[in-house]
Each structure stands twice: as structure tokens, then as C-alpha cells.
Amino acid sequence: MIDELHQKYIDTKFPPELVQMFADIIEADEVAKKVCIFIGRTERGQRGEDLNLRGVTINDIVENVMVDRLTKVEKGRSYTFHEIKTNIHRKTAERQVDKLLDMSLLFYKHVKPYKFLFLTIRGWQIVEEIVKNRAIRINQNKQ
């Protein structure tokens, strides 16, 4: 969602049923969940700092979000695949950001040559729901 469209719907919130549905959609996709939570965590950390331009770029996501990925390991003439924790690919990060933009969970401000990404009020609702669900699962596992 571009900044102008975001300003039009800045105070629009999701009803609780929709929040739960979007949280379930994001939680089903591990990469989308990591990207969404990273953006929220980074934004929250920037609130205390006195920066002129805050936000998250695709480069920030690529540098900081780690995912488990199958990589090819050669053994002589044959090869196998092992799961290794590495940084997310740029193309994957772009796809996940586009998905979150389409869901109206993010908006961006275009400052050449960057797009600074921010969570919308709806995005914050989803991130809070994901964190709440995670805390509930952790408490259930302890019992």
C-alpha cells in the first residue's frame, strides 16, 4: 500500500475475526511470519531512537532474517541436500513484502532509491495476535 492510500485508511482496523484469520495465514507461512515480526521489532526499536527517516528496507530484511533452507552438498560425484540456516534470498523477501503489502499490513514511503516499509495499524493488530498466540502455545507446552 503506497503512503497516499495508507493515509486514506489510516484509522481502519480489522474486526477480531479477520485479525485471527490473517494471523493464521501469516503463521502458516514461516517466512512471512519472520518477515512480519522482524519489521515490527525493528519499527518498535526505532521509536526510541531519534532518526530522521525510520522504516525497514528490503536490504535490512535480507541481512537480518534467517531461514532454514535446503542446500546442495556434494560428495564426490553424488550430492545430498542438507537444511542450513541462512539469510533469506532477496527475491523471497520481495515476494513476502508484496504479499504483506497486498494484505494491507504494510505501507511504504518511496525515497529514491529506497522503499521504506512500515506496519499499518492492521499490521500491528496481526503482529500482536501472532505474539499472543506464540505466548499461549509456550504456556500450554510448559503445562
Image: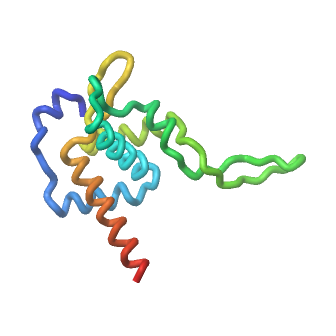
Q: Quadrant of the N terminus?
A: top left
* Residue 124 rendering spot, x and y as whole percentages: 24, 49
The structure residue drawn at horizontal position 29% and vertical position 64%, both measured from the top left corner, is: 132
Q: Nearer the viewer, residue 80 or 84?
A: 84
Q: Nearer the viewer, residue 82 or 102?
A: 82
- Name of the residue lying farthest toward the bottom: 143
Q: Image quadrant of residue 5? A: top left
The structure residue drawn at horizontal position 40% and vertical position 71%, both measured from the top left corner, is: 138
The structure residue drawn at horizontal position 29% and vertical position 33%, both measured from the top left corner, is: 49
Above or below for 50 versus 137: above
Looking at the rendered structure, the number of numbered marks drawn on it comes to 0
Above or below for 112 versus 141: above
Q: Quadrant of the C terminus?
A: bottom left
Tell me if 27 is positioned left or right of 6 in this view: right
- Name of the residue lying farthest toward the right: 76
Q: Nearer the viewer, residue 11 or 142?
A: 142
Above or below for 120 versus 81: above
- Name of the residue lying farthest toward the top: 112
* Residue 111 rendering spot, x and y as whole percentages: 31, 19
The structure residue drawn at horizontal position 41% and vertical position 42%, both measured from the top left corner, is: 96
* Residue 116 rendering spot, x and y as whole percentages: 32, 28
Tell me if 141 is positioned left or right of 9 in this view: right
Q: Nearer the viewer, residue 121 or 24?
A: 121
Tell me if 16 is positioned left or right of 60 in this view: left
Q: How is the image coloured?
A: rainbow
* Residue 92 rendering spot, x and y as whole percentages: 49, 40
